[in-house]
Image (spheres, coloured by chain):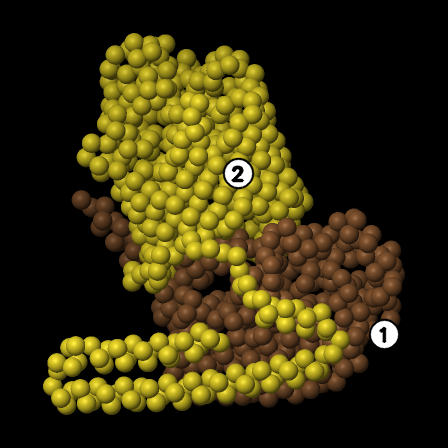
């Protein structure tokens, strides 16, 4: 109710200060007079409106007390009201909202090393560490900047090479619908998990498995979060359709070592809808085209220089009986990625020297998770890479797949105590090179404290 | 460079696909009761869509693609507010909603901001369950609240569609007249239910309980949003007997097992109240909702 009163008051103050502005005083006398008159009229109308509002308020209060009289038995709720008005702490939210993700794991692997044959793999795409360890601890600050912009920053604290490091995962601003762009349009600038397939946009704490599938590990070094800008537009159609594109610095995998500072761009389109009350789907196509001036992988021993073009398509399908995803839900999700590398590779470990390379490869994964009770889910995933042919001169190097296509089978089960806490046990069987399979067990917890925004579909 | 041209073409294609400007106001309601109220007040001049149906728990909805496209074209967003939809509405609003339906505009109507809200918590901590900082958001089960919101909604429709002012005024007057008459009937029926001791699954019926003068003895949920546990239910056995509880009430979207278990142990009937109307409810459905609810409560009062 106070906000209702504040609005007219604010208008009066603004009108009054406008009236006192130097331009108005400097203006001709008749103008000042008409202005004053207008202000008077404005004031009058607002006074009458305020009175009207007060009258309404009184009526409402009278109604309420009548109501309280009518229900003598509802003592409990009556007490609650008086308590609430006595110490009215509306919420515990800060501005900006602060959220923390706590994340830890225990892992056991049967193989000492894990190399993905035929591919140069970045640091983030490697297998996690064995034994007890912390995963990324995420710290997020986000809030509306004003009526036109929203801002968010996510920092991950990770342990790399025996030292704790802060990794800036996201730091972006984004337009709100009031920013003056056409309805349905949105601009985002800074560093963010950009739109490319399903998983890339999401923080790993919301993943359904403890690790990312081979496609995202190899082609995106876990996730593409370069510095850049992205525009998107939701079409005013009956079914969901969205198009967009971005321009990026070109420093992040699949790019790297940007010289010009503008080395990558993307385009995407998405559509989706419902099938009846219980089923939903979304389908997207994406491309990300990068100039890699120097893309390092395999502990900086393998370097690619050249053009790297990525194409992807993703599908997500959900089914929840009676539409209550909280009780029971089946989720099917798949992504296919195709990469065309045209440039030179150099594997310093194998001593290949800088050799021309123009090959393409693709990979995909498909996964299903089933929530059979509100707190319990099980899931299975298969992911596979189809390595490129080994060009002459690369035999025995990291780019030599030796005719083997890397693949991973995963199964997981997780228990969710509340929306904010989850435990997961996962088993992976990885056949990443022509050697023996790597059997992995991962036990993981993911907890969130503070503000935690809703996850997108 | 013909990439920008392709983008422009795609945009033009999208514009062409979108249906030509229909005169009707498009209402995006988060729950079926608000879509139904919009149909009462807006009549044939509006087109109301409900994001959820009667069997869905409005606390937990996915921000699905189809909802983005719906809210993208809405002239009015009409929801319960008080954080009931906090898990999905903000996402939809940021992603798709037009500037005319953002918070603070005529097109943005949150029911809980216009009626007296009950159960505002004084202390917030997640260990106390899934508390709504804004108070209990299930405000529609008090018919007086619906009368208040009908006025507010009509005012908004007139602001957005001034050409049909007379139509909206007539529509509202008719609705309010019928509603007053219906309420008089309900009041005399609920007077006999005063003090009826009941157990509820979740605090979904707080406004109904207060309006009808019932006595909420306990909830099956341990804490708001935290599912019933065996030990909590065992504790309720004693309470149910000593307080002479007459009914165990739940909504259609609450799981039945806890209330059925308690019912089988105590002999007290477990009853499902309709809670809301159908997704595409025709005019008159809201009145039927209260009729049916009171009939079920009368049965509980009469005994098993």
Please tell me which residue is depicted at 38% across the width and 79% down the height of the picture: A8
Please tell me which residue is depicted at 77% across the width and 65% down the height of the picture: B217
Q: Secondary structure at mark 2?
A: strand
Colour of chain A in the rendered structure image: yellow
Q: Which residue is mark 2?
A: A102
Q: Secondary structure at mark 1?
A: helix
Observer able to see residue A332? yes
- Which is in the foreground here, disc 1 or disc 2? 2
Q: How far apart are the alpha carbons under marks 1 and 2?
A: 53 Å
In screen coordinates, is A288 left or right of A160? left
Residue A225: image x %, image y %? 35, 38
Residue A361: image x %, image y %? 37, 25
Q: Residues within 10 Å of mark 1 (few under 14, many from 20)?
A: few
Whether pointer 1 and pointer 2 mark residues with C-beta atoms closer than 8 Å, the reply is: no
Residue under mark 2: which chain is it in? A
Please tell me which residue is depicted at 66% across the width and 64% down the height of the picture: B204
In screen coordinates, is A308 left or right of A90? left
Where A115 falls versus A419 (above or below)?
above
Colour of chain B in the rendered structure image: brown
Q: Which residue is mark 1?
A: B302
Where A164 falls versus B223 (above or below)?
above
In screen coordinates, is A87 left or right of B105? right
């Amino acid at each position: 109710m106070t906000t209702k009163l504040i609005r007219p008051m604010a208008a009066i103050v603004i009108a009054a200060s406008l009236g006192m502005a130097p331009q108005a005083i400097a203006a001709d006398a008749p103008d000042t007079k008409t202005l004053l008159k207008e202000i008077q009229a404005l004031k009058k109308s607002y006074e009458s409106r305020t009175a009207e509002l007060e009258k309404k308020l009184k009526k409402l209060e009278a109604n309420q007390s009548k109501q309280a009289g009518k229900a003598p038995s509802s003592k409990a709720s009556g007490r609650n009201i008086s308590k609430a008005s006595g110490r009215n702490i509306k919420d515990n939210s800060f501005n900006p909202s602060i959220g923390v993700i706590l994340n830890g794991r225990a892992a056991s692997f049967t193989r000492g090393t894990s190399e993905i044959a035929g591919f140069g793999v970045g640091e983030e795409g490697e297998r996690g560490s064995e034994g007890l360890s912390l995963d990324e601890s995420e710290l997020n600050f986000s809030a509306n900047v004003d009526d036109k912009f929203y801002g968010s920053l996510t920092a991950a604290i990770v342990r790399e090479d025996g030292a704790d490091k802060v990794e800036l995962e996201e730091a972006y601003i984004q337009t709100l619908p009031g920013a003056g762009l056409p309805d349905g349009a949105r601009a985002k600038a800074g560093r963010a998990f950009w739109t490319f397939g399903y998983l890339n946009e999401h923080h790993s704490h919301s993943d359904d498995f403890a690790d990312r599938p081979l496609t995202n590990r190899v082609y995106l070094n876990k996730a593409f979060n370069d510095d850049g800008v992205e525009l998107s537009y939701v079409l005013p159609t009956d079914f969901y359709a969205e198009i967009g594109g971005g321009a990026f610095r070109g420093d992040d995998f699949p790019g790297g070592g940007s010289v010009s500072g503008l080395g990558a761009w993307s385009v995407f389109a998405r559509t989706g809808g419902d099938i009846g009350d219980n089923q939903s789907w979304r389908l997207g196509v994406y491309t990300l085209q990068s100039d890699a001036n120097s893309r390092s992988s395999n502990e900086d021993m393998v370097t690619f220089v050249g053009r790297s073009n990525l194409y992807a398509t993703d599908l997500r399908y959900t089914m929840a009986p009676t539409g209550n995803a909280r009780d029971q839900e089946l989720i099917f999700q798949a992504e296919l990625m195709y990469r065309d590398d045209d440039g030179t590779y150099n594997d310093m470990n194998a001593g290949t020297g800088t050799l021309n390379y123009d090959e393409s490869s693709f990979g995909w994964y498909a996964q299903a998770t089933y929530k059979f009770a509100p707190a319990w889910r099980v899931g299975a995933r298969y992911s596979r890479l189809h390595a490129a042919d080994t060009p002459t001169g690369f035999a025995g190097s990291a780019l030599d797949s030796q005719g083997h296509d890397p693949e991973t089978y995963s199964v997981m089960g997780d228990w969710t105590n509340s929306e904010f806490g989850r435990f997961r046990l996962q088993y992976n069987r990885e056949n990443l090179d022509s050697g023996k399979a790597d059997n992995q067990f991962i036990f993981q917890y993911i907890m969130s404290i503070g503000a935690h925004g809703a996850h997108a579909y | 460079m013909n990439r920008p041209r392709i983008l422009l073409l795609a945009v033009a294609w999208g514009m062409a696909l979108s249906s030509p400007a229909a005169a009707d106001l498009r209402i995006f309601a988060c729950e079926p009761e608000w879509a139904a109220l919009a149909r009462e007040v807006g009549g044939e001049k509006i087109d109301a869509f409900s994001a959820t149906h009667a069997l869905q728990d409005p606390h937990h909805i996915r921000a699905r693609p189809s909802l983005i496209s719906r809210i993208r074209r809405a002239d009015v967003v009409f929801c319960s507010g008080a954080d009931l939809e906090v898990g999905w509405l903000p996402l939809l609003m940021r992603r798709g909603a037009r500037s005319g339906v953002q918070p603070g505009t005529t097109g943005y109507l949150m029911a809980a901001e216009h009626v007296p809200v009950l159960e505002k918590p004084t202390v917030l901590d997640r260990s106390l369950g899934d508390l709504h900082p804004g108070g209990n958001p299930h405000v529609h089960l008090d018919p007086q609240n619906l009368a208040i919101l009908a006025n507010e909604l009509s005012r908004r429709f007139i602001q957005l569609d001034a050409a049909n002012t007379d139509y909206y005024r007539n529509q509202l007057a008719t609705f309010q007249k019928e509603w007053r008459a219906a309420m008089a009937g309900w009041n005399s029926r609920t007077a006999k239910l005063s003090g009826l001791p009941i157990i509820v699954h979740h605090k979904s019926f707080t406004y109904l309980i207060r309006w009808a003068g019932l006595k909420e003895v306990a909830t099956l949920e341990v804490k708001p949003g935290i599912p019933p546990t065996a030990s909590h239910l065992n504790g309720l056995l004693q309470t149910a007997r000593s307080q002479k509880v007459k009914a165990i009430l739940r909504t259609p979207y609450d799981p039945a097992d806890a209330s059925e278990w308690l019912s089988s142990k105590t002999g007290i009937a477990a009853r499902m109240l309709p809670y809301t109307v159908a997704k595409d409810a025709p005019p008159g459905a809201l009145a039927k909702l209260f009729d049916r609810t009171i009939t079920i409560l009368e049965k509980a009062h009469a005994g098993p």
